[in-house]
Image: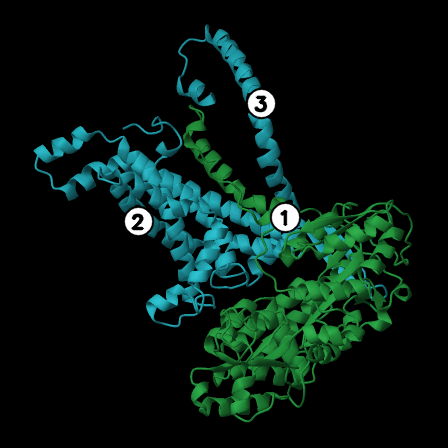
Amino acid sequence: MTALTSAAPQPDAAPRPARTLRRAGTGRLAAALLSPTLLVLGLVAAYPVLAAFRLSFQVSSESIDPQTGFKVTTTSYGLDNYAAVFTGERFLRPWWNTTSFALVSVAIEVLIGVAMALVMHRAFRGRGLVRAAILVPWAIPTAISGLLWKWIFNSQGVANELLGAKVLWSSEGFQAWLSVVIADTWKTAPFIGLLVLAGLQIIPGELYEAARVDGASPWRAFWRITLPLVRPALVVAVLFRLLDVLRMFDLPYVLVGPRKHSVETLSMIAFQEMTNLRFGTAAAYATVLFLYIAAVSFAFVKLFGADLIGRGTGRPE
Amino acid sequence: MSSSQMSRGECGTEPGLRAHADPRVRRRGVPAPARTWAVAASAALLATALAGCGSDSEQEPSAGSPAEFKGRGPITLATGKDTTRTIQGQLDRWNKSHPDEKVTLVELPESADQQRQQFIQNAQTRSDAYTVLNLDPIWVAEFAANQWVDQLPADKFPLDKMLPAVVKTGQYFNKQYAIPYNTNAGLLFYREDLLDKAGAKPPTTWKEMKETCAKVAELPEGKGVDCYAGQFDKYEGLTVNFSEAVASAGGTVVDARGKATVDTPAAKQGLRFLAEGFKDGTFPKESSTFQEEDGRRAFQSGKLVFHRQWPYQWALAGAKDGSSKVAGKFGVAPLPGLEGPGTSSLGGLDLAVSKFAKNKATALDFIKFFSNEANARTNLKASSAAPPYTDLYDDPELRKQFPYLDTLKTSLTNATPRPAVVQYGDATAAIQESAAAALNGSTSVDAALAEMQRNLSAAIAEK
């Protein structure tokens, strides 16, 4: 609303109060209509975040009473939890895992997802079956698919049988990281496929006809027509996936296990701290992750256009 | 057995991202940067949902007054999933004779970590929902130190009829906080057929075990059979196996005064046994990823001569339905050690009373009933849970049904509890971290133990 008022400068001052008044009335109605939503959002989203933020500054120090053995806890407020996050050795590696998972698996997922969408988009016999089959991995809960892949990557499992090698997938090292990327790609490439398919379906067929008439090769048609027109859908899909991977917890936790440094993510560290009842440091890790994800999504949205969230009004074409 | 399996408590569950990030619900007209931030923030905020589950863990210090057990009336028993339905049967019997003091069963998830989380949530909200808690012994110190459970009058329970090492699992600062419900200890499963062919007896020392393996390897049947495996994946099982190795070499992980003692010569010899086992091929490489079930599959398919395992493997490896290739071909012995029989770590479950519960007099009577010898016998028969009572191990009828009882008794008699540390989660993490590094060869045994000593001491002192 402020944007509209400021975007349209008023040349004469006379009608201005009336307009503002009318606007204020509409604004009040809008606020009243939105208030239930805002209330629910405030309760389920804003409050927990603010509470976690407050908690992240709460520093507890514990000691054991030598006589009774009872725990004595004193709490104060300060920045110690954040100091512990950034000075401890347990930040860089999980941060790098989180980031590398996001970069690599999303890149692979985009390639496979777009290919899947192109296949699903074609008219052929049994298309319904192929579409359903491609979406099956996406429908399986992550914890369950984690367990499935755990069996596949077991030392006596199918993966080793097929490779004819004895790879210890769940032990520390690159292979554990790779197993998470493979399982994540398997699960979520269909998601990108689905969103891209939706984008493909709104591209008018005439464009391709015109391209054919002009003698463009299918490859050229893909680069010049399909990709630009499917971009809005693809960018949304990639943003969702980025956010999803950056807070990844369940897959590495179930598939490889907690405290395996090759696959440990920031969410897992926060969880680990929480299970050890250090809620302050857990909240600090989560807040750092929050800010990191916010920064990444901000950068992403800036890079690939504000079209994402507006309705095409954001940038002049 | 308290292998920490997957532990996804409520706080671990995936916050639903997709519901929030629908781009169409944004309002038109908000300036672009603000919009950008709104999306970025509302999406990222879900990441913090994880931490939102935490609550303030303030605990006012109070004097350690001996608990009073007053009040009679209905109570609850909070325990892991009753998979064999034996618990409900025992509760029905109690409820029939105590109509005004009925006990309701509260079933918690099967995973130990999730049980702990529910117990802690219950304690932090000071809820009286759980009266009697069925605790893993490694939590007793934590629950006692936080004053979430009451000190129990030890003289009111037949603790002298129980195995002393098992009774100790319920103690913290020499006070009884929990009463053993069942117990567990490791056994050395061995291939009797191969040992007979090689003319060897079950080994009592690590050296003998390696020699026996060398003899077996020369047999035609010994081709492709690895020597020994335990639970060496980086999880609670590694803490169990490491503690056993240290204790079997005559050392301790944490001494009687609660100090970390892993930089001692005995601890070095214990860890060296494990690290060298991987280096010289006594342990198959893949056993570094073994949890209980992976090792069981390897043993049952005939790929191991020796296997350190909990007694539950007895029935499964002896199954004659074709699922086990070693049925009728294996035996059990106490764990081997450095210079003589080794020392096992203890598993099991202990019963405690929640500090915030009502009707504690009933709770005390119920624990007495629930942990009595008759019920322990039923549990052994129904779910092969090892009883804490010494007598039952010599019972001829039970011995017929469970031929390993004699060996298990020996193992339990020599066993030591896992370290009683309040911050057990940190302690076990410190142990697993350094032990895993020594096992995969990335750190020397000495350096690993020096590091473990440092981290374990820090976990015990805890800030």
Drawn colour of chain B?
Answer: green
The Cα–Cα distance between marks 2 and 3, rounded to whole angstroms, is: 42 Å
Chain drawn cyan in the picture: A
Q: Secondary structure at mark 3?
A: helix
Q: Nearer the viewer, mark 2 or mark 3?
A: 2
- Answer yes or no: are tags 3 and 1 on the same subunit: yes
Q: Position of residue B351 (x, y in %)?
A: 78, 60
Q: Quadrant of the N terminus of chain B?
A: bottom right
Task: Identify which amino acid the numbered label 1 is placed on.
Answer: Ser
Q: Earlier in the sequence, mark 3 or mark 1?
A: 3
Task: Identify which amino acid the numbered label 2 is placed on.
Answer: Ile
Which one is in front, B160 or B86? B86
Which one is in front, A289 or B178? B178
Q: Earlier in the sequence, mark 2 or mark 1?
A: 1
Q: Is A172 drawn above or below residue B276 in the view shown?
A: above
The Cα–Cα distance between marks 3 and 1, rounded to whole angstroms, is: 29 Å
